[in-house]
Image (cartoon, rainbow, N blue to C red):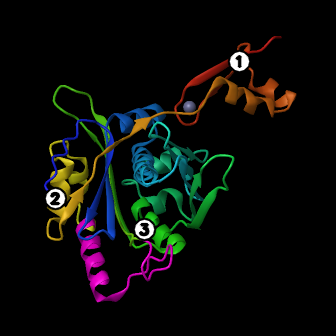
Amino acid sequence: MTQSKINIEMPDYVLPFQVGDQSIRGRLCRLTGVAERILSAHDFPDPLSMLVGEAATLVAMLGEALKFDGRFILQAQGEGPVSMIVADYASEGDSVRATAKMVEGGAEKVAAAKGPELHYLMGKGHLCMSVDRGPDFEIYQGITPLKGATLSEAAINYFAQSEQIPTMVRLAVGRLSLPDEKPQWRAGGLIVQFMPAEGGTRERGETALRGEEEREAWARAEAFAASVAADELLDPDLSSTDLLYRLFHEDGVRVFDPDPVHFACTCSREKIAAVLDRYSKEDLADMVEEGKISVSCDFCRENYEFPVKS
Ligand SMILES: [Zn+2]
């Protein structure tokens, strides 16, 4: 390991690293205040809170890797008690937000799950990842069937199918209580990918493993990453650099500067009003309660009130 002096003081961050030579790139993410802010606002049954926390962690790691300004969006749609999960990362402000929708009467089924079991909670469906660079660029989008028992597995399948990038992902979300404090949500994630540098004899974007040496190096990194335990990802007393060293020291790991992660939502009174404008007069009349229409943002739960003249 390049003995790094990286001392991470921020509570929520993504830490980029590389294993061995530069073809194997990784990111470790740890969220404390951001996880608590996102999940406590929704008050979903615990298994869904965990799944939403996993999605937020995953977009933080993937969004942080964007080499340009834009928004990275993960969306999963399913036919189970949870119909939709959305999480996005904005490079402007390094911010994440996340939410989910349950079908009517789905909360009981969701609460009965043993944990963030993707297959049970969402069933058949699709996983979509997109990158929005603003009005001057086309939106990049990849879609694969939602396949896997967990969101980690679904993400691995997504990268294998849609991008042909060998990938290993581990995600963990839990509530931890420190002495004299109420339990707080925390989240942790680890991703490693085989990403050879462009150029040389490789075609642009070609990431298939070539030759015995590459295959072995990747198999080792994949196995080391897969071995990380949820407890390790969430342990506030285990530093991220110590954890990476513990996992990858055999092949050498080089750690780069951490990037902060914040919570932020892009909702505003104007945007909500613009959405309401699209409803018919009759529909709007149905929404009036006590002389006003109240709308709360799906992501941050901020409530907006619009008085209605009678
Ligand atoms: Zn909002």
Query: On the rendered structure, is 31 left or right of 82?
Result: left
* Label ID, residue 156: 3
Name the amino acid type tagged 1.
Answer: Phe
Tell me: residue 50, above or below residue 203: above
Q: CA distance from mark 1 to mark 3?
A: 44 Å
133 or 75: nearer the eye? 133
Query: On the rendered structure, is 63 left or right of 84?
Result: left
Name, please, the residue furthest toward the top.
Answer: 310
Q: Which element carries disc 3, helix, strand or loop? A: helix
Q: Which element carries disc 2, helix, strand or loop? A: loop
181 or 90: nearer the eye? 90
**Residue at image coords 19%, 33%:** 178
Image quadrant of ligand 1 equals top right
Q: Position of residue 307 (x, y in %)?
A: 73, 14
State which region is magenta: 198-225
Q: Which element carries disc 1, helix, strand or loop? A: strand
Q: Position of residue 46 (x, y in %)?
A: 39, 44
Q: CA distance from mark 2 to mark 1?
A: 57 Å
Mark 3 within 8 Å of ligand 1, using the beta carbon = no
Which of the two marks, 2 or 1, is nearer to us in this view?
A: 2
189 falls in the magenta region: no
**Residue at image coords 68%, 30%:** 271
* Label ID, residue 2: 2
**Residue at image coords 50%, 79%:** 203
Q: Quadrant of residue 299?
A: top right
Q: Is there any visible trace of residue 128 in the rendered image?
A: yes
Q: Quadrant of residue 21?
A: bottom left
Q: CA distance from mark 2 to mark 3?
A: 28 Å
Mark 1, residue position: 306
Where the N terminus falls, by quadrant? bottom left
Specify which label sits upstream in the sequence, 1 or 3.
3
Name the amino acid type tagged 2.
Answer: Thr
